[in-house]
Amino acid sequence: AVRVLEDDPEFNAGLGSALTRDATVETDAAVMDGVTQRVGAVAAVPDLATPIALARAVLEAGEHVILAGAEAWRFAADCGLTPAAPGALVTDRARAKLAALGPRSGGTVGAIARDRAGRFAAATSTGGISGKRCGRIGDSPIPGAGTWADPACAISATGDGEAILRVALARSISMRLDGGLERAVRDSLAELARITGGTAGVISIDASSRVILQLTPEMPVAWVDDAGAGDSLGATL
């Protein structure tokens, strides 16, 4: 699911990623297995169209949790992932956002899943925020911040990355499950707002396969369950 979103220039991941202040693309991504709680993540990787595939390769290799920058690029080559040519991932839309020099804008793509055996997984990918410094790493590749999966839930977050990092948002939600997932998400987002003044959106799923979506005003989301497929924009479900 995340690979499909990375290929869509409408989203801030892979092709169409937000640009650094140098008008280049650097991406972050993470995949987490809820059974083993193993994680693979990459950060500040230049010119890679499929960062989530590289994050999965890091997970499967099992040697490290996070690879960043040029070394992640070299690992991608070792895995047979071909980096894009410089500028190939830059879109006119991303250039326009950078040129506007307004409030920092970003975006993230993410997916969560629970299979029939009750196993959870989460994946998140992003180009970060428009106009960021080269080398900036957001919440998406950090386990417990923008991405989390364990034996009880899976979570992917988007929003103000620095705020999400400060409160370890995804892990905070997972540790509040005694009161139910909906309350855990609501209370954790309220804590984030109180402490940091930032905003965030979350997709999450629990052991009963209940999906809780707490969305920012412009956050599209879609899902598939036993009842079929659905989608929403800017709602709390």
Image (cartoon, rainbow, N blue to C red):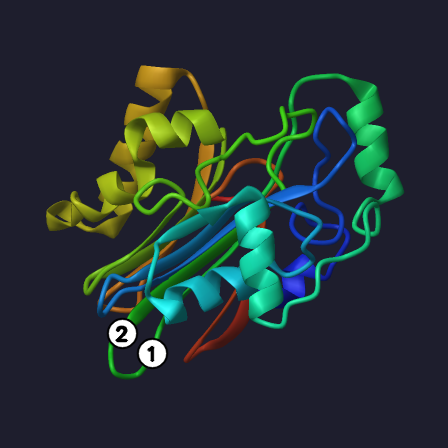
Mark 2: secondary structure: loop
Q: Distance between the residues labelled 1 and 2?
A: 5 Å
Could you tell me which quadrant the N terminus lies in? bottom right
Residue 236's image quarter? top left
Residue 154, percent from left and from top: 32, 58
Q: Mark 1 and mark 2 in contact? Answer it, CB < 8 Å.
A: yes
- Which residue corresponds to mark 2? 119
Q: Nearer the viewer, residue 22 or 209?
A: 22
In the image, residue 235 sits, relative to residue 98, either above or below, namely below
Q: Residues within 10 Å of mark 2 (few under 14, many from 20)?
A: some
Residue 153's image quarter? bottom left
Query: Taking the image as drawn, is residue 228 in sight?
Result: yes
Position of 8 compared to 34: left or right? right
Residue at image point 76% right, 48% down? 16
Residue at image point 22% right, 48% down? 174
> Which residue lies most toward the right here?
92
- Which residue corresponds to mark 1? 115
Mark 1: secondary structure: loop
Q: Nearer the viewer, residue 127 or 198?
A: 127
Q: Nearer the viewer, residue 177 or 156?
A: 156
Q: Residues within 10 Å of mark 1 (few under 14, many from 20)?
A: few
In the image, residue 61 sits, relative to residue 29, either above or below, namely below
In the image, residue 93 sits, relative to residue 196, either above or below, namely below
Residue 156, percent from left and from top: 42, 51
Position of 89 compared to 1: left or right? right
Residue 144, percent from left and from top: 30, 44
Q: Which amino acid does label 2 sit on?
A: Arg
Residue 139, percent from left and from top: 44, 38
Residue 119's image quarter? bottom left
